[in-house]
């Protein structure tokens, strides 16, 4: 099961955090700091998974991550998850973000956090993987965007009965 999904930049600033287990706000911040410290100090040429930090569950859990440009994408998972499966899920997530934002960058994650959470919700819910087909995810996100635009148009159009 996926315990948490974290995205932070090279300086440790969180850009997205989604926890699938209840933690207090302070504990979440400590987990983010600890995870950044564990992941950022590793060389680029070592494997992309390591034992989880003490706050997220220690040796019973794993941190699986990818570093793209200025962002770290980290999935905290329990021992039942496949490391290569999660690496593939990270790749699908990043490619989906890239397709939805047309060359995604850190600022897209900052200014469109709701859309990023919607994309993530299409892929993972309650710590379980729902969808890994990027085309299906993009189709659902596009449908959601069309619905939002039509609702905005309805609310902004002048009333006819005046």
Image (cartoon, rainbow, N blue to C red):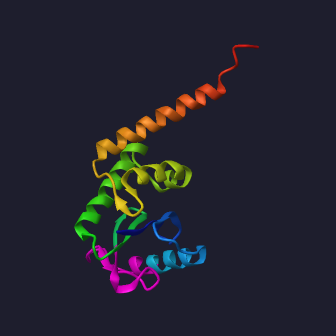
Residue 153 in magenta? no
How many discs appear? 0
Question: Where does residue 40 sit, x and y in percent of width and height?
Answer: 41, 76
Instruction: Based on the picture, tell me whether residue 58 belongs to the magenta stretch.
Output: yes
* Residue situated furthest top in the rendering: 161
Q: Is residue 140 above or below residue 94?
A: above
User: What residue is at 69 percent from the left and 20 percent from the top?
Assistant: 158
Which residue range is magenta in the image?
37-63
Image spot of residue 152 (x, y percent): 59, 31
Quarter placement of the C terminus: top right
Above or below, comparing residue 22 to residue 155 in the picture: below
Residue found farthest to the right: 162
- What's the residue at 48%, 53% (across, down)? 117
Relative horizontal placement of residue 113, taking residue 158 as reference (left or right): left
Could you tell me residue 22's position as x and y percent?
Answer: 52, 71
Q: Where on the picture, by quarter, is residue 85?
A: bottom left
Which residue appears at 55% of the width and 78% of the height?
A: 27
Question: Residue at position x 29%, y 77% from top?
Answer: 79
Figure check: 137 above or below 59: above
Quarter the N terminus occupies: bottom left
């Amino acid at each position: 099961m996926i315990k948490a999904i974290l995205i932070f930049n090279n300086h440790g600033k969180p850009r997205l955090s989604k926890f699938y287990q209840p933690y207090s706000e302070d504990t979440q911040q400590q987990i983010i700091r600890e995870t950044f410290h564990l992941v950022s100090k590793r060389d680029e040429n070592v494997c992309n998974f390591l034992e989880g930090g003490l706050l997220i569950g220690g040796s019973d859990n794993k941190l699986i991550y990818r570093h793209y440009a200025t962002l770290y994408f980290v999935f905290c998972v329990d021992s039942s998850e496949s490391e290569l499966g999660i690496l593939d899920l990270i790749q699908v997530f990043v490619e989906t973000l890239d397709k939805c934002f047309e060359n995604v960058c850190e600022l897209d994650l900052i200014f469109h956090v709701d859309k990023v959470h919607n994309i993530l919700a299409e892929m993972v819910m309650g710590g379980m993987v729902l969808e890994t087909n990027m085309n299906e995810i993009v189709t659902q996100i596009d449908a959601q965007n069309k619905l939002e635009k039509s609702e905005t148009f309805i609310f902004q159009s002048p009333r006819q009965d005046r």
